[in-house]
Image (cartoon, rainbow, N blue to C red):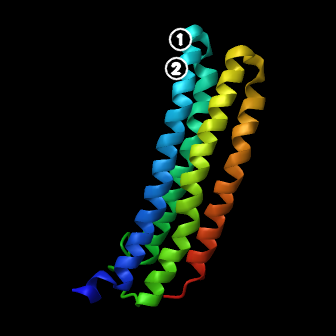
Amino acid sequence: MVETLLSGGVLACLGAAFAAGLAGIGSAVGVGIAGQAAAGVVSEDPNKFSKVLVLQVLPGTQGIYGLLIAFIIMVKIGLLGGDGMVDLTVAQGASIFAASIPMGIVGLISAIYQGRAAASGIMLVGKKPNELSKGMLFAAMVETYAVLALLVSFLMINSIQL
């Protein structure tokens, strides 16, 4: 029983779930934070809806990145497309799990903070509608670290020999 729970395949699947799950949670929280600010601005001026919507969706990208890493893992181990799941050693499964950690953790944290930055940008647009690009830039700065985590996880996964 314990051997089955600690198999390479289980560890790899946990890695896919870790990347998608944590990044998805962060995106949900971040989009929610920005959405609360957007609702306040739109309640005062409904014409600003499209501008604040752009800022609200920005924290959602981390969830997409986490899902991408999960799909890459599932394809690599044969769960999606192919002839069935590859028989992984515990070391290979642990390596795949470790490769998912950057995307999961950075995705979680950066999406929440990007939501906060986007909420501030939304408040800026509420007062000065022509400053949308500045608000987007503030939120996009946080995005940089999510992209770096995506790159690190991607490179780590692709370097694992199966």
**In the rendered view of the protein, which quadrant contains the N terminus?**
bottom left
Residue 48 percent location from the top left of the image: 62, 15
- Going 51% across and 58% down the picture, which residue do you hit? 66
Looking at the rendering, which quadrant does residue 84 occupy?
bottom left
CA gap between label 1 and label 2 equals 6 Å
- Going 34% across and 78% down the picture, which residue do you hit? 10
Residue 152 percent location from the top left of the image: 65, 69
The residue wearing badge 1 is 43
**Label 1 sits on what residue type?**
Ser
Foreground residue among 39 and 87: 39
Q: Residues within 10 Å of mark 2 (few under 14, many from 20)?
A: some
- Relative placement, left or right, of 80 versus 117 is left
| Helix, strand or loop status at disc 1 | helix
The residue wearing badge 2 is 39
Foreground residue among 109 and 19: 109
Is 132 drawn above or below residue 66 in the view shown?
above
Q: Residues within 10 Å of mark 1 (few under 14, many from 20)?
A: few
Is 141 drawn above or below residue 133 in the view shown?
below
**Label 2 sits on what residue type?**
Ala
Q: Residue furthest left?
A: 1
Which of the labelled discs sits on residue 61, or is there none?
A: none
- Going 43% across and 67% down the picture, which residue do you hit? 16
Is 41 drawn above or below residue 156 in the view shown?
above
- Relative placement, left or right, of 1 versus 13 is left
| Helix, strand or loop status at disc 2 | helix
Residue 37 percent location from the top left of the image: 57, 25
- Relative placement, left or right, of 61 versus 144 is left
Mark 1 in CB contact with mark 2 (< 8 angstroms): yes
